Image (cartoon, rainbow, N blue to C red):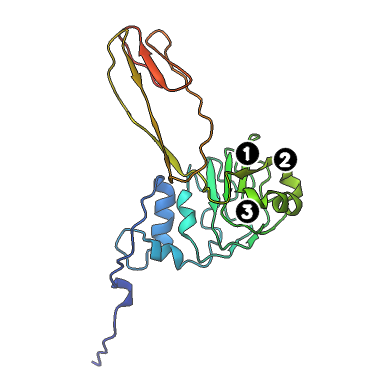
Amino acid sequence: VAVSCSKDTTSEIDNSPKIEFEDSKAFMKCIVNWDKNHDGQFSEAEAAAVTSLGEVFSWCEMESFDELKYFTGITAIEDGAFYYCSNLKSIPIPANVTTIGKHAFANCSDLKSVYCLIATPPTLGEGAFDDNDMSRKIYVPTASVSAYKAAWNQYATAIVGYGNSTSAPLERIELSAETTTIAPSKSLQITVTYYPENAEKPELYWKSSNHDVALVGMNGKVTAFEVGTATI
């Protein structure tokens, strides 16, 4: 029996930062398709090594995939790449993308926010953002708004600039309290932290699920009235 040995490149150690996913469905798609060292984690290096998404995410029930920004090796989002991701609410377009294919995000009926991280508008395929949520906005660098509206004229009314040339798209916010107890007649000020620090800071709207228990003001100050539970 002849035996030959070779280096097992699939088990090489990947020391690049691991990506923390918000959505388990998006995470599993990445692990199944691109976890090269089979460690059950997905790293920034593994994301950057991906050159094509194909239709891996089409018809996926994920709600978020902000981690797409780490896929810096892709230059095209292919035809139908996210077709019928009906639960998807927001998506970033990676900085090196030059082409967005036909129906790439079509029928993503819950899609409300698209963040383009590219100054030059990518070539856009037919119906790329058709049948999204009616309130959907496409956020682009402020200096590029005119260029995007000219190149993507079918979506011109949805295109808005984010901040100024030094601003970044808002990735997430954190509240100073996730759960808390407030005595009746007492108040608590909830503060908001935006990520990244230089992100555009949109206007926030506050509301209480139970006005008999607690009310919240327009600045995030919560006042309790009686025993019970309310969600702010």
Tag 2: residue type? Thr
**Which mark is drawn over residue 104?**
3
At which x and y percent is residue 187?
33, 15
Quarter the C terminus occupies: top left
| Relative side of 142 to 59, left or right | right
At which x and y percent is residue 32?
40, 59
Tag 3: residue type? Ala
Q: Are marks 2 and 3 in contact (CB under 8 Å)?
A: no
Quarter the N terminus occupies: bottom left
Residue at mark 2: 157
Question: What's the residue at 38%, 58% (across, down)?
Answer: 31
Q: Are marks 1 and 3 in contact (CB under 8 Å)?
A: no
Q: Nearer the viewer, mark 1 or mark 2?
A: 2
At which x and y percent is residue 98?
63, 63
CA separation, marks 1 and 3?
15 Å
Looking at the image, which is closer to me, 182 or 83?
182
Q: Nearer the viewer, mark 1 or mark 3?
A: 1
Quarter of the rendering containing residue 37: bottom left
Mark toward the start of the polypeptide (2 vs 3):
3
Mark toward the start of the polypeptide (1 vs 2):
1
Question: What's the residue at 51%, 57% (across, down)?
Answer: 56
Q: What secondary structure is found at the residue carrying circle 1?
A: loop
Residue at mark 1: 136
Q: Number of marks in the image?
A: 3
Badge 3: residue crowd in 10 Å (few <14, some 14–19, many ≥20): many
Q: Is residue 34 visible?
A: no
